Amino acid sequence: MTGHVGGPPPGRLDWMTDWSSGASTSAIDRKRKREWAKATASQAFQGVLLPPYHHTLLSAARTYLAQSEYRFAVILAQTGCEFITERLISHWLELRNLQFLDEWIYARLRPCHVGNEAVWELCKILPLDGPVLFPSDFMGRYKEHVVRRNGVVHRGEQPSKEDAEKSCAVADELFRLLDPKLGGKLLPTQAPSPRRPRKSKGRPS
């Protein structure tokens, strides 16, 4: 494979699936992600503003699509969907001063995407300006994409060009639905790093 747009260098499926795998996603460092958001704001003041990471992922997915690397296109499209969904839920929690629920919620929302029924419900009840209005036919197409992604990652299935195009299209549609809900909030421009396991403090003697 040649070339990629943003994110870690390609070559293996594992870095692409880290965000979506339950074991890895539970270790995402949300504090660092907030720091990246601040860094992005700093870039804006300096006149250098990179696209949010979910858009970078979709751009990379389209690059792989053009290179006939359909598996990578499908996986990256879903990774972008999960990234924006998780960041948006964190944003809503901050607006409601419920940041203390962040870890508790994310420990129970794996995988974190709108195909998850609990995430779907949060998209209805958390926004201060009303629920996210998904088109009536969106969820069917999105779930087809998720099944496609899982087939690639877990069963080694080979998607077609049409499959990859559909995955990129539904990811783009999701971004168009969710981006306005951020109210202009700047998002991280890079992938977050895995969090190191916390050391047990133990009981006082």
Image: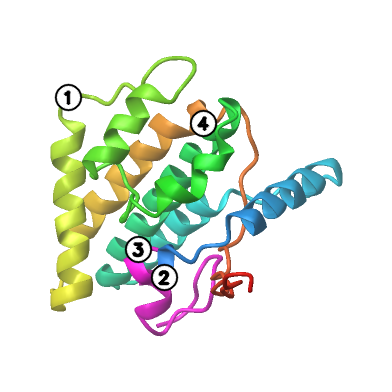
Q: In which quarter of the image is residue 187?
A: top right
Residue 122 visible from this viewpoint: yes
Mark 1 near mark 2, Cβ–Cβ under 8 Å?
A: no
> Mark 4 packing: few (<14 Cα in 10 Å), some, or many (20+)?
many
Q: What is the three-letter code of the residue carrying label 3?
A: Ser
Dot placed on the residue nearer the N-terminal end, 1 or 4: 4
Return the residue at label 2. Answer: 24
Element type at mark 1:
loop
Return the residue at label 1. Answer: 136
Q: What is the three-letter code of the residue carrying label 1?
A: Ser
Nearer the observer, disc 4 or disc 3?
4
Report how far apart the C-alphas of labels 4 and 3 lie in the structure: 21 Å
Return the residue at label 3. Answer: 20
Element type at mark 2:
helix
Q: Residue at x 45, y 81 (%)?
A: 2
Q: Is residue 157 left or right of residue 10?
A: left
Q: Is residue 82 left or right of residue 121?
A: right
Element type at mark 3:
loop
Of residue 71 and residue 143, the one placed in the foreground of this image is 143
Residues drawn in magenta: 1-23
Nearer the observer, disc 1 or disc 2?
2
* Quadrant in the picture for the C terminus: bottom right
Report how far apart the C-alphas of labels 1 and 4 lie in the structure: 23 Å
* Quadrant in the picture for the N terminus: bottom left
Question: Looking at the picture, does residue 77 appear above or below residue 6?
Answer: above
Residue 162 visible from this viewpoint: no
Report how far apart the C-alphas of labels 4 and 2 lie in the structure: 23 Å
Return the residue at label 4. Answer: 92
> Mark 2 packing: few (<14 Cα in 10 Å), some, or many (20+)?
some
- Residue 90: x and y in percent read 52, 40
Dot placed on the residue nearer the N-terminal end, 4 or 2: 2
